Image: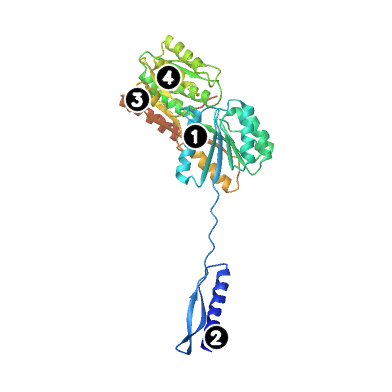
Amino acid sequence: MKSTFLRFSVLVILVALLIAGCAPAATPQTIEVTRIVQGTPEKVEVVVTATPQPEAPEPPFKVAVILPSSKDDLEWSQSLYEGLIKLQNEMGADKLEIAVTENMWKVPDAAAAARDYASKGYNLVITHGAQYGTSLQQIAPEFPETSFAWGTTTETFQKDGINNIFAYQPEAQLGGYVLGTMAAMMTKKGVLGITGPIEAGDARLYNKGFEMGAKAAKPDVKVYISYTGSFSDVSLMAASAETHIQNGADVLTGTSQSMVGAIGVLKDKDIYWFGSAWDQINLAPKNTVACLIYRWDVLLRDMIQSNKAGVPGGKAYFLTFKNGGLEIKYNDAIQIPAEVKAAAEAAIQGINDGTIKVEIQ
C-alpha cells in the first residue's frame, strides 16, 4: 500500500512537471501533491515553474561595400570603410557583418559584385562612387528587400518607381571653404594650387569651396585649379602639383585617391598641404596643416535603422559640420597661428548659423 501510494505520488509530480514544461510562458503555478510521511498521507504545496524557451539570436545586419580604390587609400574609400568599422565597434561584430570589395575601377565588375552580394542576402549594398548609379538603377528593382546606396549624388531614382536606393553627398564645399580660409592666411607668396581628378562630384564642390574661402579671407590671393582627368593616376597628380609650384604656389590641396602624387612632390619643399576626405597628416607631417574628414558613420547609422524599420531607400543624406559629418583635423606638429585657427572656427560657426553662405553653381 505504502509503495503503491508513493509511486502514484511520483507519477503525479512527473505529470505536473511535464504539463508545466509545455506551458508557453514561465508563469509560476501551485499544485497539490500527496506524499507519504511515516505512513500517513499529507498534502503539501509545490511550486512548479515552466522553463522558458531560449530566444533565437538576431542574425547580424550584413553590409557590403564596393570601393573604387583600396580601403586604406587615405581618401575617399578609406573614409567610408573607417565609418563602417566605427559602427561595427559600436554594435559588435555579431550584430554588424561587413564585406569589402576593393579597387573596382571598372563599373561592370562593380555591378557584378553588387548583384552577387544582393543575391546572397546582404541587407545593405553600398557602391561608393558616382560612376555606379546606372548599374544600381538596373540592379535594385531585382532585389526589393535589399537596400542599396551610392554617392556623391542626391538621386534615389524614386521618380522611376525604385524605393530601395539611398543617396549621399558630402557637402565638401563647406570643408573646402574652411581650409581655403586657412590657406589664404598662411601663404607667403599669395598663390594657392588645387588639383582634382575630374570637375564633378565632391571634388568640384571642394575645390570651388576652397577658392571661395581663400578669396573671402584674402581677396587678392591667386588660386589656380587644375584637373588631371583621372582618379587613380598618381603621376598626373604629381605633374599637376609640380606645375602649381612652378607657378609660384606655396600652398597646395587636392582630391581623389591619387593625391599621394602631389604629396610626394611637396614633402621635401617648404610648401603647405591641406588634405581632403580623410587624415593625410602621416603622409607629410611637416607639410600637412589640416585635413577635412568625412564622418560616414553619421549617415550609415540611419541607413541601417531605416532598413530595419522597413524603409529600404528613398533618402538622400548630406555630410555637414552641423550634423557631425564633416570635421577639421589640425596637425599639432605644425605651429598654426592662433588667428588662423580662430578664423577657421569662426568660418565653421558662420556656416552652421547661416551667416556664411557657400553656394556652388
Q: Earlier in the sequence, mark 2 or mark 4?
A: 2
Q: Which of marks 4 and 1 is nearer the N terminus?
A: 1
Where residue 195 appears, as percent x and y from the top left, is 48, 18
Amino acid on which the number 3 mark rests in the picture? Val
Which residue is rendered at x = 55% and y = 72% of the image? 20
Q: Quadrant of the C terminus?
A: top right
Cα distance in 3D space between marks 1 and 3: 31 Å
Q: Which of marks 2 and 3 is nearer the N terminus?
A: 2
User: Distance of mark 3 from mark 4, alpha carbons?
Assistant: 22 Å
Circle nearer the viewer, 1 or 3 = 1
Question: Comparing marks 3 and 4, which lies closer to the viewer?
Answer: 4
Amino acid carrying label 4: it is: Ile
- Find disc 2 in the rendering and name its residue: 4
Q: Residues within 10 Å of mark 2 (few under 14, many from 20)?
A: few
Cα separation between marks 2 and 4? 93 Å
Residue 324 position, x and y percent, is 45, 37
Mark 2 and mark 4 in contact? Answer it, CB < 8 Å.
Answer: no
Q: Quadrant of residue 356?
A: top left
- The residues bearing labels 4 and 1 have C-alpha atoms spaced at a distance of 22 Å
Report the residue at 44% width, 20% height from top.
253
* Circle number at residue 81: 1
Please say if the residues under marks 3 and 4 sit with CB atoms less than 8 Å apart.
no
